[in-house]
Amino acid sequence: MSAPSQIQPIATSTGKGLCKWWPLCKLDAQICGGIEKDRCSEFGANGKKQAPKDSELARAYRNATWSETAKRRHCTWGCGLAVECGGMKGDSCEKYGVNGTDKDNRPSDERGVDEEATQGRAQSPVKIEEKKG
């Protein structure tokens, strides 16, 4: 926007806005139109590329935002790395979580997964010696 006697235009936005498809679309939302998902010039309704599934966007978001330590943690349900399925907490797993694709066939509620191992802090087994009487 600029006034008649103004040489330099003034930005109407106060900061860089991420596209709703970020990190798959790296453009500023003001440039690609990604203020709403369907308006993005890359993945929107008339976008250049086919829109990915929500699970693919969620996986890309986790890869872009999670720390390296978090990326090494295993899913609470034991289906793999939490960064792949979102299963840092049991309810979030894309396979066995609350809205998971295989939630009706999830492992027992006890999960059968060592809690320390899911947090990436598994310790080596300690040999327990029996007392001889």
Image (spheres, rainbow, N blue to C red):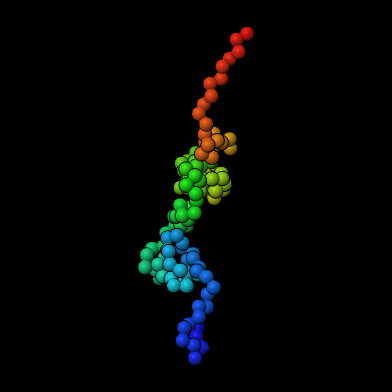
Expressed as whole percent of the image width and height from the top left, the position of residue 26 reads 43, 64
Seen in the picture, residue 117 relative to 30 is either above or below; the reply is: above
**Compared with residue 30, is residue 75 higher up or lower down, i.e. above or below?**
above
> Relative to the observer, which residue lies in front, 62 or 7?
7
Q: In the displayed image of the protein, which residue is found farthest to the top?
A: 133
| Residue in view at x 53 percent, y 37 percent | 121
Residue under the point 56% across and 16% down: 129
Outermost residue on the bottom side: it is 4
Residue projecting furthest to the right: 133
Is residue 122 shown above or below 5? above
Pinpoint residue 39: horizontal percent, then vertical percent: 46, 71
Residue 110, can we see it?
Answer: yes
Closer-to-camera residue (113/46): 113
Q: Visible in this render: residue 85?
A: no
Percent x, y for residue 77? 52, 40
Residue 100 spot, x, y in % from top left: 52, 48
Residue at x 58% of width, y 14% of height: 130
- Residue drawn at x 60%, y 13% is 131
Of all residues shown, which one is farthest toward the left? 48
Check the image and report above or below for 118 versus 39.
above
Along the line of sight, which residue is nearer the eye, 67 or 111?
67
For the C terminus, give its image quadrant.
top right
Number of callouts: 0
- Left or right: 66 with respect to 132? left
